[in-house]
Amino acid sequence: MKKQIKRRLRHTKYIFYQETLVDFKDHFWSFLGAFFGIGLIAFLQSQHLTGVENIFLIGSFGASSVLIYGAVNSPLAQPRNLIGGHVLSALVGVTAYKFLPDILWLSASIAVASSIVVMQITKTMHPPGGATALIAVLPAGKIQELGYWYAVSPVLSGVLILLTMALIFNNIPKGRKYPHHIRQTKYFHMRRMLKRNH
């Protein structure tokens, strides 16, 4: 038990240490990516969409920006997770709204809980996806009028803009690469644990 606690503490210290390695250049590129990603979506909403369609900028995009511009190496920030997590969660949220009774606490909780399971099954875990599912069931007429189109626009179209900006700004500086590929061969975790013990 003590060994496990010590191992967990070492792991936690390492994570915090890694976070302190983010320097001014990383802050700069994170800022630029998020600024242009969110800025482009907000610009399109404010300048080019009519009042009826004016829902292009949804809150979960802000949370995605934190991951894809600020935590580039995170498995949760990779393109598969970004796109799959949002789109699948949007579909789950719309389905919950359409087929469940008009009881907010029930539809909201089922939408978010189901989106988590769907993301787990499809290996597209992206935390802001839970918010995307929740937005689909909240009482805001414009989103509900879209039905399943909500998954296409604003969700998919907005996510593709964020991804495009991430591919541009995360690959300009040296030492920053997006998407980040983690090579994990079979039994990778087991071999790593054995090395620590010997």
Image: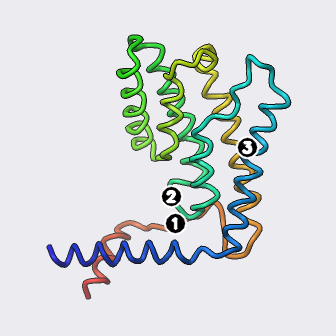
| The quarter of the displayed image where residue 26 is located | bottom right
Q: Quadrant of the N terminus?
A: bottom left
Residue 3: percent from left, percent from top = 19, 78
Mark drawn on residue 182: 1
Residue for badge 3? 161
| The quarter of the displayed image where residue 171 is located | bottom right
Spatial CA span between label 3 and label 2: 20 Å
How crowded is the residue under tag 1: few (<14 C-alpha within 10 Å), some, or many (20+)? few
How crowded is the residue under tag 2: few (<14 C-alpha within 10 Å), some, or many (20+)? many
Q: Secondary structure at mark 3?
A: helix
At x 77%, y 31%, the residue is 45
Residue for badge 2? 75
Inspect the image, locate mark 3, and give the three-letter code of the amino acid beneath it.
Ile
Answer left or right for 19 relative to 112.
right
Q: Secondary structure at mark 2?
A: helix
Spatial CA span between label 3 and label 1: 24 Å
Residue that sits furthest to the bottom in the current view: 198
- Is there CB contact under 8 Å for labels 1 and 2? yes
Q: Secondary structure at mark 1?
A: loop
Residue 60: percent from left, percent from top = 57, 40
Inspect the image, locate mark 1, and give the three-letter code of the amino acid beneath it.
Ile
Inspect the image, locate mark 2, and give the three-letter code of the amino acid beneath it.
Pro
